[in-house]
Image (tube, helix red, strand yellow):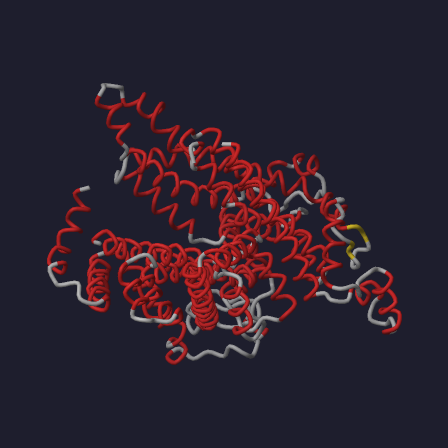
Amino acid sequence: MSQMDLRAAPTAEPTAAPEAGDITAVASGWRLAAREFASNRLALVGFAILAFFVVFSFLGPLVYHTNQVDTNILFTDQPPGPGHPFGTDDVGIDVLGRLMKGGQTSLEIGFLAAAIATVIGTLWGAIAGLAGGIVDAVMMRIVDVSLSIPFLFVVLIVSVRYGSSVITLSAILGVFSWLVSARLVRGEVLTLRVRDFVSAARVMGATQRRLIYRHLIPNALGTVIVNITFEIANAILAVAALGFLGFGIQFPQTDWGTQIANSVTEVLNGYWWLVYPVGVCLVATVMACNLLGDALRDAFDVRLRRR
Amino acid sequence: MTRYLIRRTLTAIVVLIGIAFAIFTLLHVIAPSPGRAALGVRATPQAVHNYNQAHGYLKPFLVQFLDYLNQLLHGDLGFSFVLNQSVTAILGERAPLSAFLSGTSVALAILIAIPLGIYQAVKRNSIGDTVATVVAFTLYSTPVFLFGVLLIQIFVFNLGWVDANVPQSQTLSGALADFKDIILPIVALTATNVATYSRFQRSSALDVLAQDYIRVARAKGLSARLVLSRHLVRNAALPMVTLVGLSIPALLAGNLLIEALFNINGLGLLFVNSLQRQDFQVLLAYTLIGAVLVVVGNFIADIALMITDPRIRLV
């Protein structure tokens, strides 16, 4: 409890500012959230890990040049040593370079799928919440139905049928994972739409469209942003599962899940460098997203508590 | 209470019909011409057309859907043209092993997670709590198949405690005969479940600890043990029912990945093999069963919670 009180204390001073328009209110909320976020060490750790892997995957290959296309059967399964800090894999490709390349696709799909899911989910939830009545009931029953169908199953079936590039996989993952954000945004909108500033906007003649884009979504953004981090983690896990089962990105492209699938056949030969490095990359990235999400939730919680 | 029951049952039925519709639409879009699958690539278009005509695949979409619903109600999940067998029979063969695997690991996970989470909440911020939180958070972020690979690396390769085989038998009794070989898959599934459940149990117990009735129980001089067993455990463990219901999709996914990794002949491996064979009848039938399990599981969880928790009955 004492910790909570301490957190709440600095909020007293921005509250003194007049509540003129929603813009200043949001801005101070944002600043508060940012301050809370910066004071949360775990959040910074999560952010740092995620930033590290983005830099590692996308800028790493600019510094560390390897051949990621041609196989070399004379240098398969080499243990870590000079020239190959993390060894080579079963077709003689440098593992460190492979991790970077796999990280690119895993992160790209994670971010892209989360973006697609968030856009669909936010709009769906906002429209359902604002419309209410029968429209809301139907839209949310669709969400209920889709949430009941096991996510990984559908994604596997559809990706087997429609191929697996970064774009198609992101689209498939995004299209099937917007449900949670739709529910969250609808919940937010239901509480927002009866608030005075929405009524005021209505009285001023705002269209539904304007209400959604200018008033409801910006105010539900905290929830949405928290959810994005979990969406990213889930998408990275899902694409890893796809890769692990052999339905992910195809050679010479790769992703972390595909690399784990390769390691399965090698683990009993004792080629540990094919197991641990990729495992660490995957777990650390997902963990960073989850840490970030937990921390952001705390950060935005303060903002909500203040009101 | 009766009103809640009726309303809850009606929503469940609506959702079930919606699921059947979604699965049917998916099947229709992905595998539009069963005649082609049944007769093979060499069949003439005319033969395919005749087959589709004879088996009712050219009827209007909605009529076909009603036929499909009728089929489902009679326990017929369709026909696998790849295996030339009824889907119900194929799934029935594989189900016991998967049910055993998932059931055992869920039961173990609950038995571990409830005491663990409550211990963490009671001893909040102690070393034990911190260690458990860190381990659970790491496991929570680890895909189950990667955890399985790590288990193989450590316990099979480095320590040699377990053999690298898994029971290849199709039947449950056969698998149980080599119980030692099925330990690693169960450990992998249990551990990932414990990670999810104990996080939830910890926060649920923390919520209960902040309640007034706990303060009252303490203030009237009940011993710490009685407060724990009479007031805390009961109230904090109840929401676990809902969580287990909600975690069914994750359980099915975990089952699939672990069966694929350890090559266990259950429904999960069947699903992966069917993906390779593009056997959409089997794939969508299992997806349908999974979805039905989710709905039924959540339904049972809600009802169980209503029976055990008097507060909900008032709603």
- Between residues B301 and A139, which one lies in front from this camera angle? A139
Q: Nearer the viewer, residue A245 or A31?
A: A31
How many circles with numbers are drawn on the protein?
A: 0
Residue B96 picture location, percent across and down:
67, 39
Q: Position of residue B258 (x, y in %)?
A: 57, 49
In percent of the image, x 53 and y 32: which residue is there?
A: B2
Residue A27 visible:
yes
B50 sits left or right of B311 in the view: right
* Corner quadrant of residue A168: bottom right
Q: Which one is in front, B138 or A78? A: B138
Give the side of residue B89 with respect to residue B206, left or right: right
- Please indicate, yes or no, whether residue A95 appears anywhere in the rendered image: no
Which residue is drawn at the image coordinates 50% and 45% (left, top)?
B247
Residue at 54% over, 57% down: A142
- Above or below — where is B93 with respect to B55? above
Q: Quadrant of the C terminus of chain A?
A: bottom left
Q: Is residue B245 left or right of residue B288?
A: left
Quarter the N terminus of chain A occupies = top left
Residue B249 position, x and y percent, is 54, 49
Q: Position of residue B228 (x, y in %)?
A: 33, 26
Q: Is residue B198 above or below residue A73?
A: above
Residue B295: quarter of image: top right
Residue ID at (34%, 71%)? A206
